[in-house]
Amino acid sequence: MAVAIVDPSGDLVYFERADSTQTASLQLSIDKARSAALFKRSTKIFEDQVVAGGAGLRQLKNPDVIPIEGGIPLVEDGKVVGAIGVSGGASAQDGQCAIAGAAVIHY
C-alpha cells in the first residue's frame, strides 16, 4: 500500500509506502488524497457516479477528479483540514484502509 496525506489545498505533507507497492500506486495515492481534499468528499462518490453512467460520466473530464475509491477528506470541527489517499489494493480495500487511516490521524 501507498498512503498520502495532503493539506486542504491538496499539497503533499506526508507519504509512506510498503517496499513491494506497485509503482503506479505511489502517484495514485497522492491523486486520491488531492481529489478528496479539493472536492471535500470521498473519491468513492465519484466512482459511484461514473459507475452509474449518464451525467456521472462527466466526472471523467475533470483532471482533478479521481473516480476510484481510496481518498477520504480529513474533517475537524466541520472543516476539511486535509485528506488521506490510499492505493495498492483493490478499490474497496483502498477505501477501507483510507477510512482506518483517517480514524487514527490526530490533527
Image: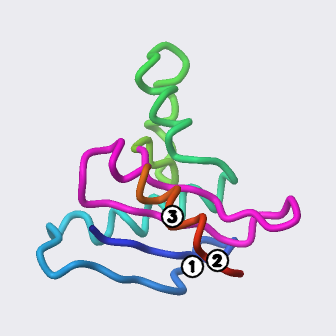
- Residue 51, above or below 19: above
Q: Residues within 10 Å of mark 3 (few under 14, many from 20)?
A: many
| Quadrant of the snapshot with the C terminus | bottom right
Residue 85, numbered label: none
Disc 3 on helix, strand or loop? Answer: helix
Q: Amino acid at mark 3?
A: Ala
Return the residue found at the far top: 54
Picture residue at 44% right of the left edge, 48% below the top: 66
Q: Amino acid at mark 2?
A: Asp
**CB under 8 Å between discs 1 and 2:** yes
Q: Is residue 44 magenta?
A: no
- Residue 7, above or below 32: below
Counting from the top left corner in percent of width and height, residue 105 is at 60, 76
Disc 3 from disc 2: Cα separation: 9 Å
Disc 1 on helix, strand or loop? Answer: loop
Q: Quadrant of residue 10?
A: bottom right
Q: Which residue is mark 2?
A: 7
Q: Which residue is mark 3?
A: 33
Disc 2 on helix, strand or loop? Answer: loop
Q: Nearer the viewer, mark 3 or mark 1?
A: 3
Picture residue at 43% right of the left edge, 51% below the top: 96
The stretch in magenta equals: 69-95
Mark sitting earlier along the chain (3/2) = 2
